[in-house]
Amino acid sequence: MFCNFSESLRDFSDRRAMQRDCSHRQLDVVVARSCGICYPNDPSACLDYLRNYLGEEPWPRTSGNHGTRKVLGILAPHIDLRVSQRAYREAYRWLWQSDPADLYIILGVGHRARLEWSLDLRDYLTPLGRVQADREMARKLLSVLDVPLLEPKAHEEEHSIEFPLVLLQAARFWRGVGKPFRFLPILCSGLFSAVAQGSPPEERNPMYRLAAQLQKLLQEVPFSVQLVVSIDGCHVGPRFGHPFVVTPSVRAEIQRWEETLWETVRRVDAPEFFAHLGRNGNACYFDGVGALALVMEIFGKEAEFIRTYYEQWFEPRDQSLVTFSSGVWLDPKN
C-alpha cells in the first residue's frame, strides 16, 4: 500500500497539480483535496499526525460481549478532522480491533451529486499512497442495476470518501498491515421525495436492488468486507439558512429529535425513520438519510446497531451547530 515516501509525495504532488491544471479532463485517479488543510500533505507528518490523532491505544475497550463480536461496519463522522478527534476515535476503534478487511464499502454523502446513488471507478491518491478501487465489484453493480450510477465529478473533493481512506491507510500502517486494501465508494442522497412523503422510497427506487446486490456481495465473496458509513448529523443555524440562532433550548430539542431518529435505525424501522424525518421535512438538515436507509436495507435484522458517541459542534461566531455520531454494526450471531 505504501510506496517509498519520497515517491509517494512526488506522485501525489504531480497528480494534484494535474488535477488543478486539467480539471476539465478525467484522470485515472481521484486526488485528495483536504490534505494540507485538515491534515498534513507530507507522508511522514501525516502518519505522525494521525497516529497521535487516533490516540496511543486505539483499541476498543471491551464492554459486555461487544469486544468479541464480528464487526460488520462502523458509523463515522466526516466532519473536518480538526473538529473532533474523539468522534473519529470512537468510530474507527472498532476497525482497529477486528481483522483488517480486504474491501471497504464506503457509504458517503453526495454533497455535489446529482444522482441519488453514485459510483466511481477510479483509484484514490492520498499523501499515504494510492488506494485501488474495486472496479470489478463496481462494474457488477452497474451491470445488474442497469440505471445511471456513474458520476465521477461528484466524487472529486468529496471528503466523506477521502477521510475514511486516509484514516484506514494510517491505521493499517501503524498496525503493520502491509497488504493493500480496496474500496468501493457509494455516494448517497438525501432521498428528498421519500422524506417529503414521510415514507420509504417506492419499490422502483434503485436503492432496493443496490442493497440486495451489496448484501449478496457481503455473503458470497471469498474475501473480507466491512462497511464504513461516513455521515454527519444535523446542520442547524444561520450558517445553514435557518432564521434563528442556536440556543441551549434549541440544542436540547435537536438532541431529542435525533435520539428518536437513531432509535428507528437501531430497530431497523425504515417506515418510522422516514415518518420521523417527514414530520418536519428534515428541517434539521440531517445529511445521512440515504446512507442509513441503504444500510438498513443491506443488514436488516442481521446486524445489531450500537451508537457509542454523540457530539454537537457549536460555533459561537455564527451561533450554528453540526452534530455527528459514532457507532458500530455487530453480527448478532458471533
Image (cartoon, grey):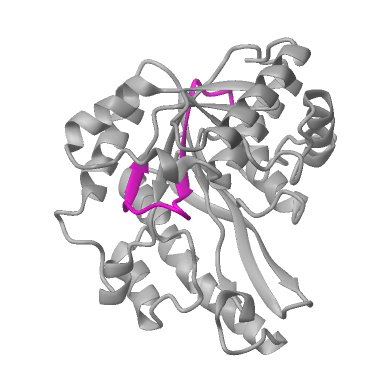
- What x and y, as percent, mark residue 65? 59, 41
Residue 26 relative to residue 43: left or right:
left
Image quadrant where one finds the N terminus: top right
Above or below 105: residue 76: below
Residue sitting at 62 percent across and 80 percent down?
237
Is 25 placed left or right of 128 in the picture?
left
Q: Confirm whether residue 175 shows in the render.
A: no
Q: How many callouts does the rendering have? A: 0
Let me know if residue 99 is in the magenta part: yes
Asked if the stretch drawn in magenta spans residue 173, the answer is: no
Of residues 260 and 130, the one nearer the viewer is 130
From this view, report whether residue 136 is shown above or below residue 23: above
Q: Residue furthest left?
A: 204
Left or right, 35 with respect to 155, comes to right
* Position of residue 155 measured from the top left corner of the image (x, y, whole percent): 47, 41
116 sits left or right of 287 in the view:
left
Say whether residue 324 is visible: yes
Q: Position of residue 13 (x, y in %)?
A: 69, 25
Measured as percent of width and height from the top left, residue 30 is found at 52, 31
Q: Is the residue 314 above or below the residue 12 in the image?
A: below
Q: Residue at x 55, y 64 (%)?
A: 233
Among the 4 quarters of the image, the one containing residue 50? top right
- Which range of residues does the magenta coloring cover? 97-118
Q: Looking at the image, which is closer to me, 121 or 190?
A: 121
Give the residue at x 67% y 89%: 249
